[in-house]
Image (cartoon, grey):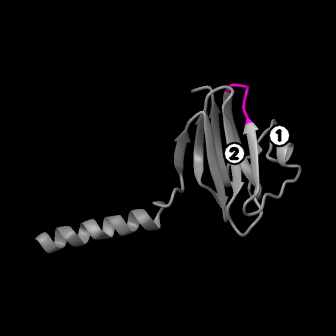
Amino acid sequence: MKVRTLTLALASVALFVACGGSGRGESIEGNDVVVEMYDNRYQYTEIQVPVGGSVTWVGAGRNPHNAVEADAKWATEDVFGSLELREGDEAKLRYEDPGRYVFFCTFHGNAEGDGMAGLLVVGGG
């Protein structure tokens, strides 16, 4: 019985690690947060900052990435000057308007929130 319980526990841990234990789908909250853009995924898919808070978007993969708001209200291109952020590139955006914003990578997602996409909440719910 103990061996079976241990086997089930180890299988659960392995499944957790394989399905997202590396940051996929996680959320972050803070005044000034950093979000790395890995190959075809964001480090965090839900971000919450207060009005006046910032997000530093960092290229961390082999592929180019960006973050663009679904209604084109903001984009990393606004401060970086290019849609292509490569490994080590950074774009820091400050958010003054409260709201809920779907963001996506124009290379690996879309404005409907499919693929490489997430939600930014500015100023609470």
Q: Which mark is residue 72?
A: 1
Q: Amino acid at mark 1?
A: Ala
Name which quarter of the figure residue 7 lies in: bottom left
Q: Which residues are magenta?
A: 94-98
How much space separates mark 1 and mark 2, taking CA atoms?
18 Å
- Please name the residue shown 31% across and 70% down the image: 11
Rendering coords of residue 46 (x, y %): 58, 43
Rendering coords of residue 35 (x, y %): 63, 49
Rendering coords of residue 81 (x, y %): 89, 49
76 with respect to 31 (left or right): right
Note whether residue 92 is visible: yes
- Please name the residue shown 53% across and 44% down the image: 27
Q: Please name the residue that numbered disc 2 is placed on.
A: 56
Q: Quadrant of the C terminus?
A: top right
Q: Is residue 99 above or below residue 120?
A: above
In magenta segment, residue 27: no
For the view shown, which residue lies furthest in the left direction? 1
Q: Quadrant of the N terminus?
A: bottom left
Q: Amino acid at mark 2?
A: Thr
In primary-sequence order, the first of circles 1 and 2 is 2
Check contact, mark 1 vs mark 2: CB within 8 A: no
Looking at the picture, tell me which residue is in the foreground, 38 or 2: 38
Q: Main secondary structure of the magenta part?
A: loop
Looking at the picture, tell me which residue is in the foreground, 118 or 60: 60
Q: Which mark is residue 59?
A: none
Looking at the picture, tell me which residue is in the foreground, 19 or 87: 87
Looking at the picture, tell me which residue is in the foreground, 118 or 23: 23
Q: Is residue 74 above or below residue 57?
A: above
- Please name the residue shown 48% across and 60% down the image: 20
Q: Nearer the viewer, mark 1 or mark 2?
A: 2
58 with respect to 75 (left or right): left
Rendering coords of residue 74 (x, y %): 80, 38
